Amino acid sequence: MKRFQDENKRSYNFTEAIAVKCPKCHKQASVTKKPDGKKGYGYTKILACRHCHFSQQGGMIKYKAVVDQYCCNNSEKVNYESQLLNEKPETVRLKCGSCNEIKAFKPKIVEVYMQFVTDENNYRECCFNTELWFQTAVKGNIFWAYNEAHIGYMERYIAADLRERNSQYNGGKTMVASLPGFIKDAKNREKLLKAIQQWKGSYR
């Protein structure tokens, strides 16, 4: 009899390296976390593909500089909206229509979040909106995993005849406790394990 005991892992415990579909060549890429040395805390996500060498660091955020201010009188405003920018400008030099002078204005910065266009029916990584590499349909549901470690953990759970919870944990629902019903259903065990074997056969 195969036995599984919940190790109290959450989904985020498997997000250090997420296997995704490269938005450029559609082969397997990865999203990893890089500690943010400047702030001393937090991290930056990096999307990288070893096949086509595509790389994107951090969330895909662009900026718009917007000016809606009075210049030399209170009757006419200077209005301006920039194109999408890679960096936040401190000031924008614009010509006032009233006094005909070029002056520096402090703009309002608007963040614009950019994402890759992907199949909305598939599960996606949240930072870059890239499709997860490991996902397949099982009984009308999407069965997915972040990476090899995630697959291995779920495989042990699915294959187990006896599934035990850890009674010493009081921190809310663990990953396996939060799994959808079709994964917990023993009737789907064979199909789920077959999908896992196919995933494992594709490991690079």
Image (cartoon, rainbow, N blue to C red):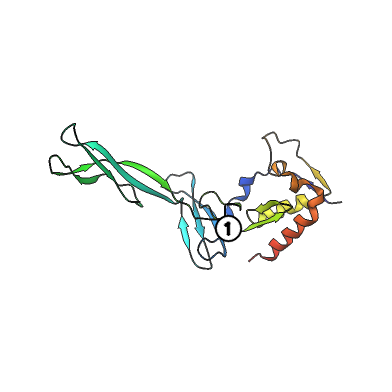
Q: What is the total number of numbered labels drawn onto the structure image? A: 1
Q: Nearer the viewer, residue 116 or 92?
A: 116
Q: Position of residue 129 (x, y in %)?
A: 53, 52
Q: Residue at x 63, y 56 (%)?
A: 147
Q: Is residue 72 above or below residue 20?
A: above
Q: Is residue 57 above or below residue 5?
A: below
Q: Position of residue 7 (x, y in %)?
A: 72, 44
Q: Position of residue 196 (x, y in %)?
A: 72, 58
| Mark 1 nearby-residue class (10 Å; few <14, some 14–19, many ≥20) | many
Q: Is residue 72 above or below residue 176?
A: above
Left or right, 114 with reference to 107? right
Residue farthest to the right? Answer: 1
Q: Nearer the viewer, residue 163 or 120?
A: 120
Q: Nearer the viewer, residue 79 or 150?
A: 79
Residue farthest to the bottom? Answer: 51
Q: Position of residue 140 (x, y in %)?
A: 71, 51
Q: Secondary structure at mark 1?
A: strand
- Quarter of the image for residue 100 reads top left
Left or right, 87 with reference to 32? left
Residue occupied by mark 1: 20
- Quarter of the image for residue 19 reads bottom right
At label 1, which amino acid type do we have?
Val
Quadrant location, the C terminus: bottom right
Q: Is residue 172 above or below residue 2?
A: above
Q: Residue at x 18, y 32 (%)?
A: 75
Q: Residue at x 21, y 46 (%)?
A: 93
Residue farthest to the front? Answer: 75
- Quarter of the image for residue 181 reads top right
